[in-house]
Image (cartoon, helix red, strand yellow):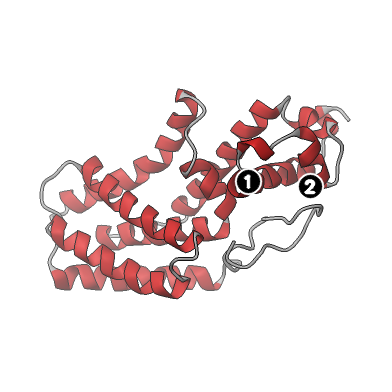
């Protein structure tokens, strides 16, 4: 099978299987034979679609960041920069819950090289820009927007990791995420009442989005030996 006629579904299935194996068993679990068995294809498919295992590993990370960027770009800018910032946080959460194995691959493993680190940085730039808007509109006190963005990201990342480890439930995150955001925003200089209103607006916006999205964890995650199989709930 030449690259021109390669089945895109097989390529996607290989990426999903590789992400799951990396998340559940680590790098040593990855081999062309194991992947072929997981997907139900030949070992040659890895070389047809990626050229080799190194290229497949890179493709897993690129797909993870692409899905994250897609979620972030779905958040429109409004006149309320703090609500937009909160909505970005929800979009980030939705992506992690919908693509848990890919999330682990991009954020719980070291970048392959500087080029890959640059790809990941592009998703962070949107957060920095939105924090800068919060400062420019007077909601946050003057500060380094990148520093505030790092604080926000690490707080959200920690909560997501707790969900993926089954330490917190999604219902608990819904409660604690808003409280965490309020505490950080007020610490950054926002008025408590203004922060509360913006968080409420963002939550309403993202609830509408979530009501039209697939259930958490349903996006493409596969079980062994199936081209299209069901995801384990909350995996």
In the image, 126 versus 27, the foreground residue is: 27
In the picture of the structure, the residue carrying the numbered disc 1 is 25
In the image, 181 versus 42, the foreground residue is: 42
Mark 2: which secondary structure?
Answer: helix
Q: Quadrant of the C terminus?
A: bottom right
Mark 1: which secondary structure?
Answer: helix
Q: Percent x, y for residue 200?
A: 30, 73
Picture mark count: 2
Residue at x-position 28% and y-position 45%:
150
Above or below, 37 against 116 in this view is below
1 vs 224, left or right, is right
In the picture of the structure, the residue carrying the numbered disc 2 is 38
Label 1 Cα neighbours within 10 Å, binned few <14 / some 14-19 / many ≥20: few
User: Quick check: can you spot residue 155?
Assistant: yes
Q: Nearer the viewer, mark 2 or mark 1?
A: 1
Quadrant position of residue 76: bottom left
Above or below, 77 against 199 in this view is above
Label 2 Cα neighbours within 10 Å, binned few <14 / some 14-19 / many ≥20: many
Residue at x-position 51% and y-position 42%:
106
User: Residue 183, which numbered label?
Assistant: none
In the image, 5 versus 16, the foreground residue is: 16
Q: Percent x, y for residue 155?
A: 31, 55
Above or below, 56 against 150 in this view is above
84 vs 122, left or right, is left
Q: Percent x, y for residue 202?
A: 35, 67
Q: Percent x, y for residue 119?
A: 47, 33
């Amino acid at each position: 099978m030449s690259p021109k006629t390669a089945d895109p579904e097989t390529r996607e299935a290989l990426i999903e299987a590789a992400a799951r194996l990396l998340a559940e068993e680590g790098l040593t679990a990855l081999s062309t034979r194991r992947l072929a068995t997981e997907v139900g294809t030949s070992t040659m498919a890895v070389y047809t679609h990626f050229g080799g295992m190194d290229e497949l590993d890179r493709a897993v990370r690129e797909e993870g960041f692409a899905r994250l960027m897609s979620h972030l770009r779905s958040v429109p800018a409004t006149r309320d920069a703090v609500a937009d910032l909160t909505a970005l946080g929800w979009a980030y959460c939705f992506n992690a819950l919908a693509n848990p194995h890919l999330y682990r691959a991009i954020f719980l493993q070291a970048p392959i090289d500087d080029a890959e680190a640059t790809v990941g940085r592009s998703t962070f730039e949107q957060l920095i820009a939105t924090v800068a808007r919060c400062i420019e509109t007077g909601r946050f006190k003057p500060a380094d927007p990148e520093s505030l963005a790092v604080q926000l990201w690490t707080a959200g990342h920690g909560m997501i990791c707790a969900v993926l480890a089954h330490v917190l439930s999604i219902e608990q995150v819904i409660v604690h995420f808003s409280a965490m955001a309020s505490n950080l925003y007020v610490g950054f200089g926002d008025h408590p009442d203004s922060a509360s209103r913006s968080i409420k607006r963002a939550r309403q916006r993202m609830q509408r989005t979530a009501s039209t999205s697939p259930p958490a964890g349903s996006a493409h995650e596969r079980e062994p030996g199936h081209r299209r199989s069901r995801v384990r709930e909350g995996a």
